[in-house]
Image (cartoon, rainbow, N blue to C red):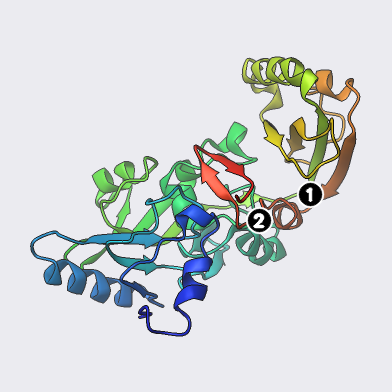
Amino acid sequence: MISPTDKSYEAEVSSWWAKNARQKADCFVLPHTSDEVAMALKTLVQADCEGGSDIAVRSGGHSSTGSSSTVNGVTIDLSRLNSTSYNRQANTVSVGPGGRWQYVYAELIQYGVTATGGRDGDVGVGGFLLGGGNSYYSGRMGFGCDSVVNFEVVLGNGTIINANQTTNADLWRALKGGSNNFGIVTRFDMEAVPAPKLFRDTRFLLSNYSDAFVDAVVGFADSDESIVDDHFFTFFSHDPRSVPGLDIFAAGVHVNTQGNTNSPTPFDEVVALPAFFNNTTVETIADAAAGSQVQSGTWYVDDHQIDPL
């Protein structure tokens, strides 16, 4: 447990990604096992019998303010539950909720497999999967939560159970997206996915090409399953530190999960436009995730990052 008088308290607060998500809880609990999570949760629920305090649960800490932190109670930080393993016989991967995707991928890539996890390597496993989870493999596999075959869950009374298609199936379905709080998940068992190298094409264009980006997104969404192994996302950003004229820009990333550099997609319309920055790589998903991290220490508003004031 870390209390406000401990030397490590401020460092714990600052470990959240966004500045406005760095809330100062009455104390932080950092369990190392599911049994410790069960003990902590049962104790906290019993101690707060009148319901006056919050119990927040943190995985990677990329959620919006109040989703994985609190100023009125205790935050359970699951970052120590970060193990990753691969069961070759069952072709499943088991990951702890406190894992970060770049390290999960790095562990799994040695077996030639991966999981339907996050694109930003610093994102935590738990929040991503319980929220749904949009990955490079979504075209073929659906949301990240769709690949979860079993949840190990600590219930509010401290009981540790498994939820899957045959045992506690209602809870298994309920935990697949929605960021709900039916319990604290302490392990995710997921289908493994083959992991050839990814082809990634990243382009930054002036903001006056925004309409072309939007048209490409619409075209991509309307495409058939012939491009099931392709993934395309775009974003718009304002950076006042950039060269004048380049401070507002549009960016798009096209990924083919089979490493195919010639896969025709609606993104080709964007390729024909003049980019002031373009980077094309063929790399492992572990390397891609490690190189795709949004800088921490920014303010976070409605799923966008803005510069610190």
Whether residue 192 is situated above or below residue 152 in the rendered picture: above
Q: Write down the quadrant of residue 239 in the picture.
A: top right
| Secondary structure of the residue carrying numbered label 2 | strand
Q: Residue at x 30, y 42 (%)?
A: 174
Residues packed near mark 1 inside 10 Å, few (<14), some (14 to 19) or many (20 plus) = many
Front residue of this view, candidates 89 and 147: 147
Is residue 205 toward the left or the right of residue 185 in the image?
A: right
Task: Identify the amino acid type marked 2.
Answer: Val
Residues packed near mark 2 inside 10 Å, few (<14), some (14 to 19) or many (20 plus) = many
Q: Residue at x 38, y 83 (%)?
A: 5
Front residue of this view, candidates 236 and 91: 236
Is residue 187 toward the left or the right of residue 192 in the image?
A: left
Where's residue 145, x and y in %? 45, 44
The label on residue 119 is none
Q: Tell me which numbered mark, 2 or 1, is placed earlier along the sequence.
A: 2
Q: Quadrant of the N terminus?
A: bottom left
Where's residue 269, x and y in %? 82, 18
Task: Identify the amino acid type marked 1.
Answer: Lys
2 or 1: mark nearer the eye: 1
Q: Write down the quadrant of residue 47 in the picture.
A: bottom left
Where's residue 192, x and y in %? 57, 52
Q: Residue furthest left?
A: 50
Q: Which residue is mark 2?
A: 113
The label on residue 197 is 1
C-alpha span from label 2 to label 1: 11 Å
Where's residue 231, x and y in %? 68, 33
